[in-house]
């Protein structure tokens, strides 16, 4: 590998903690961050469970009030992770270092906040408590904060972080699902390989759990509405779907030679990426087909120069939906055909919920920790496993697998599949 692209900084926020250490410790102990939704009244929804983040606020991030008014939870998570990842990589913004630092992020849907509109609605009501549009257009609309529409543009979050930290390199937002985040990471790798920036931040952040995001997940059919006792059980025969989660993460990437020149330690390189599209419309499920998943994984292997026999561990998409899990297992088994070794698999969603665009970035940070520590946490999966998963899944207790080559998978519920390959230096 010529001058590998390596990870020199990282930060995550998850339902299990606001940093990597707290999340990692909780995962090793099998702790779940899934619980009742408390941010809004979910009693009218068939699913009332999610994995929520708490304790992230503008004051702790030193943000002016004017800026924070158009920052929702996803923006705050992105800001916190960016600040911590930059510190972890011993980097500052361009104003101090003279370096152009790039920034690519996978960010999902951004929904409006109901309380941003309630003042205007109240001022528009007539004597019978009906909306009077004459009142709205004459004066009530002035109750809406003028910059409110900006809060619903997902690239505004990237801009706010870039301005705050002085990031002036190449940048873009990819959306809306996990496959997009992997594409953003690989774009960052390409920027570094071609010398267009010396360091790049690659990020992924989940959507805030709200009435709108929950309704969207229910409409797409991947939310568990059948089994509240076991909200998310990846690779279980009678699994019922997934639950939403909040969180995200950022890695700082640079070439190994750049890291060495700054005396920054690096243990893991990102070496391959593949993507494919193929919709599997099975009983309402519209995620990627087995063939698309296999093509994405094969693409990551080709671009890295590895064979699947060399892959020690796959951090699967593993969302807990019946067809999604079965298609992924079939694709993995197909690539294993003829191999003399067994590739083990792991999923974080039984503990963290489905972070959508934030999921693969959190998995990348976890994969780096698994490579550096040699340990793999257990998957939260009570029950009989689906066929072909029984000897692959890391379950019951942490395992010392000492993985050297790890693949991260991420899908959309519309048919896209993405795979990224990480390896120990």
Image: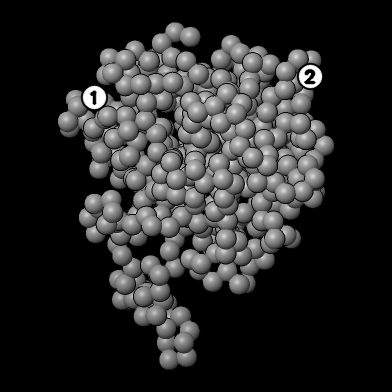
Depth check: give the residue in front, 338 or 380. Answer: 380
Answer few, some or many: residues within 10 Å of disc 2's Cα (few below 14, many 20 plus, some between 14 and 19): few
User: Is residue 290 visible in the rendered structure shown here?
Assistant: no
Whole-percent x, y for residue 270 in the image: 49, 21
Above/below status of 104 relative to 423? below
Residue 414 horizontal side relative to residue 15, left or right? right
Residue 61 horizontal side relative to residue 373, left or right? left
Q: Residue furthest bottom?
A: 127
Q: Residue at x 41, y 15 (%)?
A: 193
The residue where tag 1 is placed is: 99
Contact, mark 2 vs mark 1 (Cβ under 8 Å): no
User: Is residue 366 visible in the rendered structure shown here?
Assistant: yes
User: Which numbered tag is attached to residue 266?
Assistant: none
Q: Which element is circle 2 on?
A: loop
The residue where tag 2 is placed is: 337
Whole-percent x, y for residue 395 in the image: 68, 39
The answer to which of marks 2 and 1 sits earlier in the sequence is: 1
Query: What is the CA distance from the residue labelled 2 to the residue labelled 1?
Result: 47 Å
Q: Residue at x 58, y 69 (%)?
A: 42
Depth check: give the residue in front, 373 or 356. Answer: 373
Answer few, some or many: residues within 10 Å of disc 1's Cα (few below 14, many 20 plus, some between 14 and 19): some
Tell which tag, 2 or 1, sits nearer the viewer. Answer: 2
Whole-percent x, y for residue 108 in the image: 50, 46
Whole-percent x, y for residue 386 in the image: 80, 40
Task: Report the number of numbered marks.
Answer: 2
Q: Residue at x 65, y 46 (%)?
A: 380
Q: Which element is circle 1 on?
A: loop
Q: Residue at x 76, y 31 (%)?
A: 391
Residue 119 horizontal side relative to residue 421, left or right? left
């Amino acid at each position: 590998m010529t001058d590998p692209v390596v990870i020199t900084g990282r930060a995550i926020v998850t339902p299990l903690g606001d940093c990597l250490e707290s999340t990692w410790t909780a995962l090793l102990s099998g702790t779940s961050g899934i619980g009742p939704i408390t941010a809004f009244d979910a009693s009218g929804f068939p699913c009332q469970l999610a994995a929520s983040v708490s304790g992230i606020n503008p004051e702790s991030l030193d943000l002016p009030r004017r800026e924070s008014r158009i920052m929702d939870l996803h923006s705050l998570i992105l800001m916190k992770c960016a600040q911590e990842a930059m510190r972890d990589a011993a980097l500052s913004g361009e104003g101090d270092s003279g370096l152009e630092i790039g920034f690519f992020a996978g960010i999902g849907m951004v929904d409006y906040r109901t309380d941003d509109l309630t003042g205007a609605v109240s001022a528009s009501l007539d004597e019978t408590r009906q909306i009077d549009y004459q009142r709205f257009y004459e004066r009530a609309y002035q109750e809406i904060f003028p910059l409110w529409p900006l809060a619903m543009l997902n690239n505004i979050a990237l801009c706010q972080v870039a301005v705050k930290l002085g990031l002036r390199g190449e940048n873009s937002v990819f959306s809306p699902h996990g496959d997009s985040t992997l594409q953003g990471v690989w774009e960052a790798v390409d920027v570094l390989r071609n010398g267009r920036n010396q360091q790049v931040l690659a990020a992924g952040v989940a959507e805030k759990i709200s009435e709108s995001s929950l309704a969207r997940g229910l409409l797409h059919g991947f939310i568990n509405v059948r089994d509240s006792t076991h909200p998310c059980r990846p690779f279980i025969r009678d699994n019922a779907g997934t639950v939403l989660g909040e969180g995200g993460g950022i890695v700082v990437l640079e070439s190994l030679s750049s890291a060495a020149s700054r005396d920054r330690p690096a243990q893991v390189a990102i070496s391959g990426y593949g993507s494919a599209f193929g919709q599997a419309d099975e009983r309402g499920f519209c995620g990627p087909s087995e063939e698309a998943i296999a093509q994405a994984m094969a693409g990551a292997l080709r671009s890295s120069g590895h064979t699947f026999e060399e892959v020690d561990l796959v951090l699967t998409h593993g969302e807990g939906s019946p067809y999604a899990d079965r298609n992924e297992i079939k694709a993995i088994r197909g690539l294993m055909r003829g191999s003399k070794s067994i590739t083990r698999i792991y999923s974080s969603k039984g503990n963290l919920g489905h972070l959508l665009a934030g999921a693969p970035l959190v998995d990348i940070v976890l994969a780096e920790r698994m490579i550096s520590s040699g340990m793999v946490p257990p998957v939260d999966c009570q029950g009989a496993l689906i066929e072909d998963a029984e000897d692959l899944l890391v379950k019951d207790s942490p395992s010392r697998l000492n993985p050297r080559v790890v693949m991260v998978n991420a899908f959309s519920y519309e048919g896209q599949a993405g795979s990224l390959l990480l390896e120990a230096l």
